[in-house]
Amino acid sequence: MKKDIEKVGTECAVCGPESDEVVAVVREHEYSNTTEDLFTLVRCRRCGAIRLNPRPAVSEISTLYPSDYFAYDLNPAAGGNKWSPKAISLRRESRRLSSLVRRHSVRAPQSVYDIGCGDGTTLSLMAELFGPNVRTFGCEVNADASARARNAGHDIQNSLFEECELDRNTYDLLLSSHVIEHVASPREFLSKAASMMGPESVFILDTPNVANPVRRLFGRHWGGWHTPRHWNLFDPRSISELADKTGLQVVAIQQMTINMFWVWGMHSLVATKYPRTAEKFFNPRKTITGGTWSLLSLVLFQVLDRVLLVITRRGGQMRVVLKQSSGN
């Protein structure tokens, strides 16, 4: 574990230099080969967005994302178990995305771009859903994952999204699943995405929702902190304000459950006193890959999250549907 990694000061992605309040002091607990530094989470008093301040520098990306980072390998075929939590989740996700795209698009997309595409699993799902003529593109910072995506038949750039050279007004459908919270400048991120869209394009963005009861329940142990990789976190109000500043408008927000945040939260909570127990029962790296206990725990946490969502109408993540602002 590295000590004293390079860090940079931050300001609110929505409001700029506004007044902040400290939310929690947090540290890595999911991986044993990143950094042992402590990080401070602060909340903007005006818009409610939460961020690390200071956050790790972009130069530390390779430190924060080890080679076994879970998002680099999402393909259930690698494990060969169609009933693994990973495979079940991907099938459910495929149906949700298909329904949402058809609801907000005037026609089936002919070009899809996935920001932070990992091994290309989601792009492959899009190709299955929308037919063999759909063109699939993406970017991924991890070289191995981007190579697997290319081998699956997708046009992939091995780069940070912010550094990619992309055509303007080109893509019918943009996808970004839990990426914006990882980037240095969410405003630049959304502005670049907006430039890739035409008048009828749809951008579906998933990100944690800090305005949810599970965050309050777990406090500094909430799985959505994903320290030190989540740098900027939003609620419906703050993400809508940020979109307005970048030439986009929010046309819908779906509140959604996310059982993995329970797993990560339980791991953080239990590991403070019983690290071996935490690793055995709430291993954040292995839960998604399968096993009887993994499946049972995820089902239990899914039920709990669903009950809270029904009662409070607030989920641990939100799916934001964006289009170009009418003035663009």
Image (tube, rainbow, N blue to C red):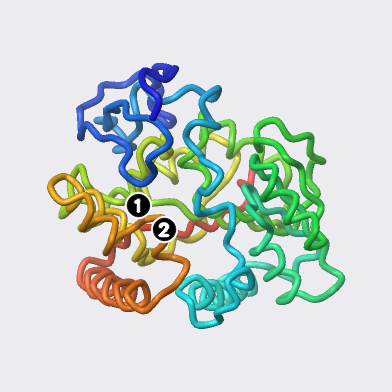
As drawn, 3 above or below 285? above
Choose between 272 and 239: the one closer to the eye. 272
Relative side of 102 to 82, left or right? right
Q: State the image coordinates of residue 249 (x, y, percent, origin top left).
A: 54, 48
Q: Secondary structure at mark 2?
A: strand
Q: Secondary structure at mark 1?
A: loop
Q: State the image coordinates of residue 228 (x, y, percent, origin top left).
A: 38, 35
Please tell me the numbered disc located at residue 318. 2
Q: State the image coordinates of residue 250 (x, y, percent, origin top left).
A: 51, 52
Q: Amino acid at mark 2?
A: Met
Indicate the quadrant containing the N terminus: top left, top right, bottom left or bottom right.
top left
Relative side of 220 to 190, left or right? left
Camera sees residue 201: yes
Residue appearing at x 24%, y 49% in the figure: 268
As drawn, 327 above or below 209? above
**Residue bearing the label numbered 1:** 209
Q: Residue furthest front?
A: 276
Indicate the quadrant containing the C terminus: top left, top right, bottom left or bottom right.
top right
